[in-house]
Amino acid sequence: MHSEKMFFSTAVKHLKKCIPIIKENFALKNIGSIQFEGTYAYKDFTTYLPKEYENKYGNEKITDLELDNFLKQSRMDIELKKLLLSLKKDTYRYGIEKFEVRNANISGICILVRITNDE
């Protein structure tokens, strides 16, 4: 986890640069999930995700399946796919812990991304 606030797209670019080093010690074909903790550190998460959610659902609570579909259609998924496609993987399912949107602010979330493992 990094200590500075940054855009999620920047974090994905940094992660992509680490792939060659990760490949030296791990079989990337076996990776089945990625977890993002402390997502308050991503400037764009705290702005566009709540706005996208509010535009679509208002203050309505949604099911896990609706949340999964929402995140698969979000700008976050677009950024994440830039990394996953280079690994020949794709998003499969999203999970969120401690998710709260209040007054267009998102707080206390941890996003778990299940990714395909076709190989």
Image (tube, rainbow, N blue to C red):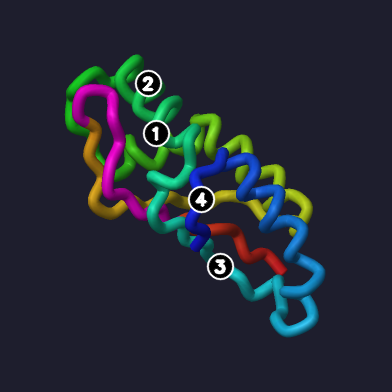
Extreme residue toward the front, this view: 4
- Mark 2 or mark 4: name the one nearer the start of the chain: 4
**Residue kind at label 4, given as amino acid type:** Glu
Q: CA distance from mark 1 to mark 4?
A: 14 Å
Mark 3 vs mark 1: give the one in front.
Answer: 1
Q: Which residue is mark 1?
A: 46
* Magenta run includes residue 2: no
Q: Secondary structure at mark 1?
A: loop
**Residue kind at label 3, given as amino acid type:** Gly
Mark 3 vs mark 2: give the one in front.
Answer: 2
**Residue kind at label 1, given as amino acid type:** Thr
Q: CA distance from mark 4 to mark 3?
A: 27 Å
Q: Decide if residue 4 is on the left or right side of residue 106.
A: right
The magenta span reads 102-112
* Magenta run includes residue 104: yes
Disc number for residue 84: none
Q: Which corner quadrant holds the C terminus?
A: bottom right
Disc number for residue 4: 4
Disc number for residue 32: 3
- Across and down, in percent, residue 53 comes to 34, 25
In percent of the image, x 37 and y 21: which residue is there?
51
Disc number for residue 51: 2
